[in-house]
Amino acid sequence: MSQDFPVPAETAKAPKGSVARLIQVAKSQVGYIEGPKDNETKYGAYTKSNFQPWCGSFVNWCANEAGVKIPNTVILQVVQQHLRRLVHGLMETLQIQSQEI
């Protein structure tokens, strides 16, 4: 994660808070590689969801760097993963209980 992919300076064509700036920031990250662990990124570290799929974290990080306000796109992924684990555990419990009958 020690790669250096600095965000370029704002320009007249890509001022803070603009879609052009958001695109400029996102393009500046082309070539960034996660790791050394799976899904370990500066984007996940920023959103406090490191080691998770990082597409939402990337979008949030870029928007923050560009000064563009967007809803948190990471929460949905985290909630989905927790619900999946919860349902999986519940299904295992139900299977064990039905085998005991």
Image: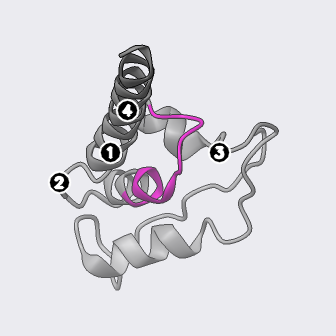
Decide whether residue 56 is among the magenta residues.
yes
**Range of magenta residues:** 49-59
- Label 2 is placed on what type of residue? Pro
> How many marks do you count on the picture?
4
Image quarter where the N terminus lies is: top right
Q: Secondary structure at mark 4?
A: helix
Gap in Å between the C-alphas at discs 4 and 2?
33 Å
Residue 4 is a magenta residue: no
Single out the residue that lies furthest toward the front: 101
Along the polypeptide, which appears first: circle 3 or circle 4?
3
Q: Earlier in the sequence, mark 3 or mark 2?
A: 3
Depth check, mark 4 against mark 1: the one in front is: 4
Q: Secondary structure at mark 3?
A: loop
**Residue situated in front as seen by the camera: 24 or 87:** 87
Residue highlighted by disc 4: 91
Question: 76 or 101: nearer the eye?
Answer: 101
Whole-percent x, y for residue 16 in the image: 28, 65
Tell me the crowding category of disc 3: few under 14, some 14 to 19, or many 20 or more residues within 10 angstroms, Cα based.
some
Identify which residue is drawn at 34% across, 25% down: 94
* Quarter that holds the C terminus: top left
In percent of the image, x 49 and y 64: which residue is there?
9
Q: Position of residue 45 (x, y in %)?
A: 52, 33
Q: How far, Cα to Cα, is label 2 from label 1? A: 17 Å
Q: Give the Cα separation between the discs numbered 4 and 1.
A: 16 Å
Residue denoted by label 3: 39
Q: Is residue 41 above or below residue 88?
A: below
The mark that comes first in sequence, 3 or 1, is 3
Tags 3 and 4 touching, CB below 8 Å: no
Disc on the earlier residue, 4 or 1: 1
**Percent coordinates x, y for residue 92 in the rendering:** 44, 27
